[in-house]
Each structure stands twice: as structure tokens, then as C-alpha cells.
Amino acid sequence: MRYLVRKMWVLCTLCFLLSSGFSQENVKCLIKTSLGEIVVELYYDKAPITVRNFLKYVNLELYYQTSFYRVCNPENESEREIKIEVIQGGNVADKNLSEPIPLETTQKTGLKHENGTISMARGGPNTAQSSFFICIHDQPELDFGGKRNPDGQGFAAFGKVIKGMEVVHLIQKQEDKGQFLIEPVNIHSITQIILYDQLMK
């Protein structure tokens, strides 16, 4: 009971901080997977819409027990004209998806799809919801004006891996069929670690 009360207090406080414009420039999130842990830093000051969207799924615990389910590597991209290397995850159940968000292009944010960048997956412009990907090596064709997506708008970068790239590489090496992992890598949880630690002091 005490744990539930404490958890509710933390979540309520986080919601208050988010709604009151609390600076999230240095927010970090811990991604716990079945193959290890990844820490990402989110750039709220550069991509506020995208970061708020990601944190909404994080703080509602909707990424719990999702997975990294798709990988792009030199072998399965060999026949593509524009090749990329990424891992993709965050397959939240349809019933829990929020409305798609406006696309914050790299032209708007000044961010680039560099090694370790975390970015939102999408189909057409303004369709991103929960799925995200992490870049392996620099991927300029995912920036605004890049040719990976025919519309040339690129994708919404919003942060970067600061710890655990070895786990990202390990996920990319898992066996796939048509880029989809035969055994998806479980995402046990994604949690916000900076604000939580501050509240617990």
C-alpha cells in the first residue's frame, strides 16, 4: 500500500512539473531490455513536441513489455538504394496509442541523425505515435532532405544514447526475417530517471 501511494505521488508530481513548464533539457530515460540497459538523453529544448509525446508513453508505463522488433543492417538492406542501420521498438497496443503528433523535422530542430540518435518512426508526415528507432552510425538520409523517405521530410530526432550502445549493437545482430526479429527483444520498461531521482532525495 505504501509503495502504491508513493508511486501515485511521484506520478502526480511529474505530471505537475510537466504541465507547469519545468525544464526538461536534461531529462534522461532508462530503457531496460532483455539484452541489457540503454540510457538516452532527451533534447526538450530542441524538440519539445516529440519529447513530450515520448514522455507521455513513458510516464503512463505504456512501453512496459513492448519490444525492439525490427532491425536494419547491411545484410537486410543490401537491395535498398538508400541504406540505413537502426533498431526500432516501442510497439504499444493500438488501444493505448495517442493521437499522432506534428513532425518536428531536423530542419526545425537543428538535430541530426548521428550515431546513437533516438528518433520517431513514422509513415507519412505527422503520423508518429509510439514507435521509435535508434541510429547505428550516422544516418544523414534520415534528416530533412534525406532520401530514405520519399517525401523528403526526414524523421523527428529528439535525443541520443549516452550509455549502452553495445546493447543497441547486440539487438541489431539478432536474427531477423525481412528486417523483423524472429524473437523480438523485450523492453521490460522505460523510465524517466532524472526527475525521479530528484524527487526521491
Image: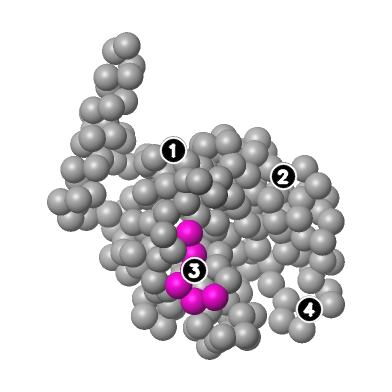
Magenta region includes residue 103: no
Residue at x-position 76% and y-position 50%: 181
Q: Is residue 56 visible?
A: yes
Residue 140 image point, x, y percent: 58, 79
**Residue at 71% over, 48% down:** 170
Residue type, numbered disc 3: Thr
Dot 3 or dot 1: first in sequence order is 1
Residue assigned mark 3: 127
Amino acid type shown at disc 4: Arg
Looking at the image, tell me whether mark 3 or mark 2 is earlier in sequence order.
3
| Crowd band around label 2 with a 10 angstrom C-alpha radius: few (<14), some (14–19), many (20+) | some
Position of the N terminus, as image quadrant, is top left
Separation (CA) of disc 4 from disc 1 = 35 Å
Instruction: Tell me the CA gap for discs 3 and 1.
Output: 21 Å
Q: Mark 4 and mark 1 in contact? Answer it, CB < 8 Å.
A: no
Q: Which mark is residue 80?
A: 4
Q: Is residue 42 visible?
A: no
Relative to 1, 36 lies left or right: right
Q: Are marks 3 and 1 in contact (CB under 8 Å)?
A: no
Q: Which residues are magenta?
A: 124-129
Secondary structure under tag 4 reads loop
Q: Where is residue 61 drawn, in percent x and y?
A: 44, 38
Q: Is residue 166 left or right of residue 100?
A: right
Question: Residue 12 falls in which quadrant of the image?
Answer: top left
Q: Residue furthest front?
A: 95
| Pointer 4 local density, CA inside 10 Å: few below 14, some 14–19, many at least 20 | few
* Crowd rating for badge 3 (residues with CA inside 10 Å; few <14, some 14–19, many 20+): some
- Residue 178 at x, y percent in the picture: 82, 61
Residue ID for mark 2:
184
